Image (cartoon, rainbow, N blue to C red):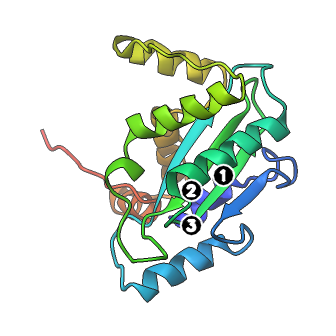
């Protein structure tokens, strides 16, 4: 599952031949192995091996270098004290965007990503403060009732959303499956759990 996420995040066609790939507390070329070593060191056997998030920028607002710098600063501020993170900047859509692959276990103390380190609202608050310092756009008063239109607009602009990522994972699993059992196995390998409802 971690290999799939790493390959998606560090895709050379999206990151200018992996030029915009940085490791925080790890070397991006060996990050997956380093993260697995941390898990083994702390005897972590949880099914959740990493977390994957992203941050997008307004079209035409930033250069790839600026977007990546903001992304690295965010990762350092959010998780840099205790977690291994790979930060990548994708250049293949109208909206430049950064991906974050965060080890679910701290290399320092073996504790799992939890609380503020995992909270969407904290992530957004920190990202907004960094964007404000860089003079970049952010919405200080987001209308949370318009989430569905927000996701639709994100997808129309070619940006990943939690829904599009799940759809991609399901499509990939279906392409490598011949029955429900192999589909379940493929999704499990990617970090998803399949729940079937029998009617």
* Image-based side of 199 in relation to 37, left or right: left
Q: 165 or 116: nearer the eye?
A: 116
Say which of marks 2 and 3 sits in front: 3
Q: Residue 13 placed where, x, y %?
A: 82, 47
- The quadrant of the picture occupied by the C terminus is top left
First in sequence, mark 1 or 2: give its number.
Answer: 1
For marks 2 and 3, give the CA distance: 8 Å
* Residue bearing mark 1: 9
For marks 1 and 2, give the CA distance: 8 Å
Q: In the image, is residue 34 above or below residue 48?
A: below
Q: Residues within 10 Å of mark 1 (few under 14, many from 20)?
A: many
Q: Residue furthest front?
A: 133
* Residue bearing mark 3: 84
SS assignment at label 3 = loop
Tell me whether the residue at label 1 lies in contact with that at label 2, contact meaning CB atoms closer than 8 angstroms: yes
Say which of marks 3 and 1 sits in front: 3
* Residue bearing mark 2: 101
For marks 3 and 1, give the CA distance: 15 Å
Q: 52 or 7: nearer the eye?
A: 52
């Amino acid at each position: 599952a971690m290999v799939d996420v790493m390959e998606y995040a560090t895709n050379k066609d999206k990151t200018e031949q992996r030029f915009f790939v940085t490791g925080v507390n790890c070397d991006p070329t060996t990050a997956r192995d380093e993260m697995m070593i941390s898990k083994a060191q702390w005897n972590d056997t949880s099914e959740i091996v990493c977390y994957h998030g992203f941050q997008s920028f307004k079209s035409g607002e930033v250069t790839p270098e600026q977007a990546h710098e903001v992304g690295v600063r965010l990762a350092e501020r959010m998780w840099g004290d205790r977690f291994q993170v790979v930060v990548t900047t994708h250049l293949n859509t109208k909206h430049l965007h950064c991906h974050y692959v965060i080890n679910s276990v701290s290399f320092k103390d073996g504790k799992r990503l939890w609380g503020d380190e995992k909270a969407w609202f904290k992530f957004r608050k920190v990202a907004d403060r960094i964007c404000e310092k860089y003079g970049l756009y952010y919405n200080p008063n987001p209308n949370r009732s318009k989430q569905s239109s927000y996701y639709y607009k994100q997808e129309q602009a070619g940006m990943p959303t939690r829904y599009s990522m799940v759809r991609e994972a399901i499509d990939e699993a279906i392409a490598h499956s011949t029955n429900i059992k192999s589909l379940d196995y493929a999704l499990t390998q990617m970090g998803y759990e399949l729940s079937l409802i029998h009617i």
